[in-house]
């Protein structure tokens, strides 16, 4: 958790092969998963969010993809696997 904005942006581009300037949110944790840093490009500069838990750990999704809603659950300590959603109607457009 010693890395700053520039180092984390370097990890995103060099180790993950992603572009840190896309506006995606990149989440990093320590080995014990009780600290996290989130790096986000906001168009005119980077934002870095850091949080350390006094007790407990963070639960990250297995597939390395996370929605905005899951980020909020993560920060609030909600177990993402246990969240059940009601089935809702959604209309998907199909283009030919």
Image (cartoon, rainbow, N blue to C red):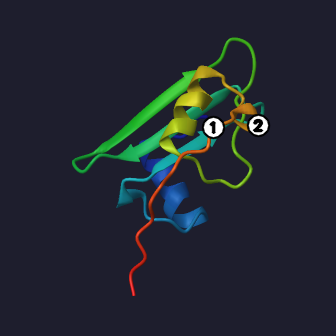
Residue placed at 29% from the left, 46% from the top?
Answer: 42
Q: Secondary structure at mark 1?
A: loop
38 to the left or right of 16: left
As drawn, the residue found furthest toward the front would be 89
Given this view, does label 2 or label 1 mark the residue nearer the observer? 1
Q: Earlier in the sequence, mark 2 or mark 1?
A: 2
User: What percent of the width, then of the height, locates residue 51?
Assistant: 55, 23
Compared to residue 93, the image places residue 33 above or below, namely above
User: What percent of the width, then of the height, locates residue 34?
Assistant: 70, 25
Mark 2, residues whose alpha carbon is within 10 Å: few (<14), some, or many (≥20)?
few
State the residue in front, 65 or 19.
Answer: 65
Residue placed at 75% from the left, 37% from the top?
Answer: 81
Q: Which quadrant of the view contains residue 11?
A: bottom right
Compared to residue 63, the image places residue 75 above or below, namely above
Q: Which quadrant of the view contains residue 47?
A: top left
Residue placed at 61% from the left, 34% from the top?
Answer: 1
Please give the label number shown on residue 68.
none
Q: Which residue is mark 2?
A: 31
As drawn, the residue found furthest toward the bottom would be 96
- Look at the image and tell me in which quarter the C terminus lies: bottom left
Compared to residue 87, the image places residue 18 above or below, namely below
Mark 1, residues whose alpha carbon is within 10 Å: few (<14), some, or many (≥20)?
few
State the residue in front, 56 or 10.
Answer: 56
Gap in angstroms between the C-alphas marked 2 and 1: 30 Å
Q: Which residue is mark 1?
A: 85
């Amino acid at each position: 958790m010693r890395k700053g904005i520039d180092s984390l942006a370097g990890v995103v581009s060099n180790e993950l092969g992603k572009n840190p300037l896309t506006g995606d949110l990149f989440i990093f944790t320590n080995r014990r998963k009780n600290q996290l840093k989130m790096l986000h490009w906001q168009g005119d500069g980077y934002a870095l969010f850091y949080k350390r838990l006094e007790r407990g750990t963070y639960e990250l999704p297995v597939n390395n993809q996370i929605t905005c809603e899951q980020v909020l659950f993560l920060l609030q300590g909600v177990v993402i696997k246990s969240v059940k959603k009601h089935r809702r109607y959604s209309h998907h457009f199909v283009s030919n």
